[in-house]
Image (cartoon, rainbow, N blue to C red):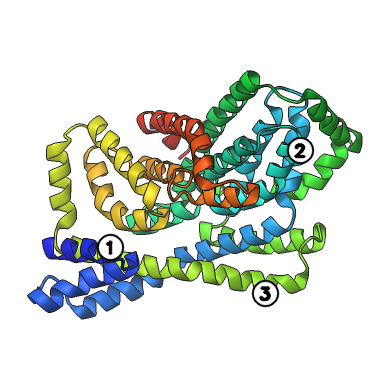
Amino acid sequence: MSALLIFFFAGLLIGLPIIASMAVSVVGPLILTGSTAYSVESFVRWTLGGADNTTSIAIPMFILAGAIMAKGGISKRLFNVFALAAGKKTGGLPCAVVLTCLFYGAISGSGPATAAAVGSMAIPLLIEMGYEKVFCAALVATSAGLGVIIPPSIPFVLYGMVSNTSVGDLFIAGILPGIVIGLFLMIYAVVYCKIRGEDKEKIGANYESLKKRGVFRVLRESFWALLSPIIILGGIYSGIVTPTEAATISVFYSIVVSVFVYREVPARSVPRLMTEAVKSYAPIIILIAMATAFSRALTMLNAPQMIGEFIIRTFPTKTAFILVILLVFFIMGMFMDAAPGIAVLAPILVPVAVQLGISPIHFGVMLIVNLAIGQITPPFGTNLFVTSGLAKIPVLSLGKKAIPLILVFVLALLVIAFVPWFSLALV
């Protein structure tokens, strides 16, 4: 096991991509040490088996559906509904942004996609309403983290595949934690607006313009957007379709709504969007394939048992284990995308969590929420890069403004981590 880990971390240190580091770490010890724990043939078989997985098809389908709906004006229509409901209340429009991210996350399954779709529409509007530009961008970046927690979530699909946990159960488990985080962010937004003040005249004028259009008209225009998560998630939770089948349905639904109902996506653009989805998915499927081989090699070398015994010896209580894991994933999320973190560590840590009496579903929710924080944490928070480009603000300035929102997110994470009910009540 030590040779495998040495090869893996050496590969990362010299700048190899994580996929290449995993491949070298599995094959390298075989060539140099002549290990008989497994063979090159086993490595090839494990790699092909990891790629040949029906569940993984859900990932490009959700990516494609999110890309089509982002172009189809879905986020704008969702925001109008929540802005109309918020009225002239203090912090109403920032709360509408959080709710829009919450609902859009139930369509895209991706944090950066949610940040791009909601941010491109909401940030200019909030600035026009008198809100500070950097606050607007920080709020969207943070709220977009809900995109990987509210189902359908691409990281949940990855976690379910590498940990042999039901993706459907993980989707259900993400609902209440997503709502909890959304509530925490809305409370912060209201308090912030009470302290900093708002331009009530501009907000009132925006509300009156929506009101003149009529509640019925706004709801009618937003009906198909609001219906999309109900169709996708309702099919999964009712048992009518699997997550993979629901992902395929979401693609057809997004095409029908965006091309034929809202007519904001030309039919000729759909093939190009499909090509972009395949390009986005290709690195993920290679990562899944290599992570499968990597985790199988670790299993053959008894690494999970050895690491598990070390962790339990060092951190013998459930509380200590949870705190250490949250800290490790928080730091890792600052420098690494969610997918590699899940692929490398989940197969090792899930057996340890189960041994300590932690449900693998609850553990998965904790990891995904933690990695969602990484998307908004400097220096490499992907959501920050998306919204900084939209608002034309330096990433570091945006990161500083996002710190209070990150702390609110962390507080919500601690509640979710130590109150398993939020993750397991609906499962």
Q: Three-letter amino acid code at disc 1?
A: Leu
Q: Are marks 2 and 1 in contact (CB under 8 Å)?
A: no
Of badges 2 and 1, the one in the foreground is 2
* Drawn side of residue 80 relative to residue 299, left or right: right
CB within 8 Å, label 3 to label 2: no
- N-terminal of the pair, mark 3 or mark 2, is 2
| x and y percentages locating residue 200 in the rendered image | 78, 23
Q: Quadrant of residue 90?
A: top right
> In this view, which residue lies farthest toward the right?
212
Mark 1 near mark 3, Cβ–Cβ under 8 Å? no
- The structure residue drawn at horizontal position 73% and vertical position 22%, both measured from the top left corner, is 89
Q: Position of residue 5 (x, y in %)?
A: 18, 61
Q: Which residue is mark 1?
A: 12
Q: Is residue 128 visible?
A: yes
Is 213 drawn above or below residue 380 in the view shown? above
- Identity, as a three-letter code, of the amino acid under mark 2: Glu
To which residue does mark 2 refer?
Answer: 128
Residue 251 appears left or right of 59: right
Q: Position of residue 328 (x, y in %)?
A: 29, 43
Q: Nearer the viewer, mark 1 or mark 3?
A: 1
Q: Residue at x 74, y 41 (%)?
A: 125
Q: Which mark is residue 271?
A: 3
Q: Gap between marks 1 and 3, in whole Å? A: 36 Å
Distance of label 3 from label 2 (alpha carbons) = 35 Å
Indicate which disc, 1 or 3, sits on the residue closer to the N terminus.
1
